[in-house]
Amino acid sequence: MLRNSATGLTAIERVIKHINGQLKNTTDKNLEGVLDKVKIYLENSNNGKIMHEVAQALCHLENVFLKRTKVGLFASNSHPTGKLIAELKKQKKYRPISKWSQEKINEVGTIEVPATFHQLLGGIYVTLAEAYQPGWTCEYITNSPEEGIVFKVIEDWQKEVIPLNRTKNHALRDMGRGGINVKLTAELEKQIELEEKTTNKSGSIDEIAFHGRRVSLFVKSATAYKDEEDQRLIEEWLRTNGSQENQNIVPYLIEKGEIKFNNSQHFKEDDAADALHIGPTSNTGEWVEEGGYACFKCMTKVHSLTKGGGQKVIYRDSEQPGPDQIVEKEHHELTSFKRSDEMKELPPLLEGEVKIKLVVAKDEEGKKFVKPIVPQLAVKSHTDYLEIPARFQHCEQQLTPKFGS
């Protein structure tokens, strides 16, 4: 559980400490009752049901009404807390927890407190809501600058992408379709444009030749590859293997079992044992020169997962109540629109941020080859349906304050 670097306390511990201080000073019985109830929920969160108990606390606060104004704590933007929640709603970062299914929330009724306490209760609410959104973030640590991140799944992936098993110029065809991009300096972009104007009189573009030239200039601009053999190997690898398949590391983590269903939360043991597979994804990635090396930087968003041999689909539905808005349906029940476009309008189930770096290594016989290493890998789950990878379950690193920075 992430602790504040200044106080050493989790958000729950900070809120409980704050409530204890307020209880010593308040004379308002209704406010005292609200704070007592929230405190009980938070103290009960130590029993392993953190999200459930925090949701109960948040729901209780949502049922607070302000005296005289007769509006809910977050129902009006006429005070600071109300304005904050209104802004979060615009950004689609806030869903009232009291709208969740009654299976999760037992709180009923309302309670009135003096309007002057909106800031106190609003501060508690926002602290809990921001700190305890469903999900987790894991940032993998490199073994060394030379090796990058190394564990079995990454090693298996490397074995698949090192050999030049694809057809010649496979990646160049991807580049021609806009599936992947090679980023050049402004100077090199001008050089390419000038070459096209002077050599291409017909106006039609030979995609293979055009993108092959871009790759060649890109490799020559990467200063880490000193000799001609290194440059030749890197260029050959990029032409063949530098395609959009490099965006698939996060799906690979899922399909190889690094990321699994959280069976303690939502699924029977036999369901959770099913292998996960990827549904619609959205990716942004390109080859860039970084520190003299050819690097592929990619952000992947996973919008649905399947289990049961692909028969059942798990995805977000805008009409579904709950903290996750997640539903599980038989694959045949979904329209193609629901499987793609609409899913991508909602927050992803999982995000991944990856950097691949191409280095020239030597095998046991001293023969050179291109080895893609992974110096950066972070995954963020936006749901508690997915379990934190086992390697992160007993360390502070499992929750990190920023993602995509």
Image (tube, rainbow, N blue to C red):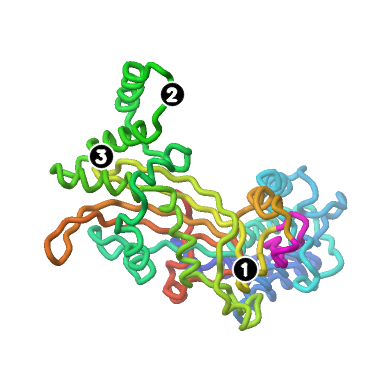
Q: Which mark is residue 219?
A: 3
Residue wearing tag 1: 310
Q: Amino acid at mark 1?
A: Gly
Distance from label 3 to label 1 (Cα)? Answer: 41 Å
Tell me if residue 368 comes above or below residue 264 in the rendering.
above
Instruction: Give the mark, 3 or 2, whose residue is nearer the N terminus.
Output: 2
Q: Nearer the viewer, mark 3 or mark 1?
A: 1
Mark 3 and mark 2 in contact? Answer it, CB < 8 Å: no
Q: Is residue 272 above or below residue 224?
A: below
Figure quadrant of residue 105 = bottom right
User: Any magenta on residue 327?
Assistant: yes
The answer for how far apart the CA atoms under marks 1 and 2 are is 43 Å
- Disc 1, SS: loop
Left or right: 26, with 49 as reference point: right
Q: Which mark is drawn over residue 204?
A: 2
User: What residue lies at 43% left-to-right and 59% top-to-bottom?
Assistant: 249
| Amino acid type at image mark 3 | Val
Q: Residues within 10 Å of mark 1 (few under 14, many from 20)?
A: some
Residues drawn in magenta: 317-333
Percent position of residue 32, x then y: 75, 68
Q: Amino acid at mark 2?
A: Ser
Looking at the rendered image, the disc whose residue lies closer to the viewer, 3 or 2, is 2
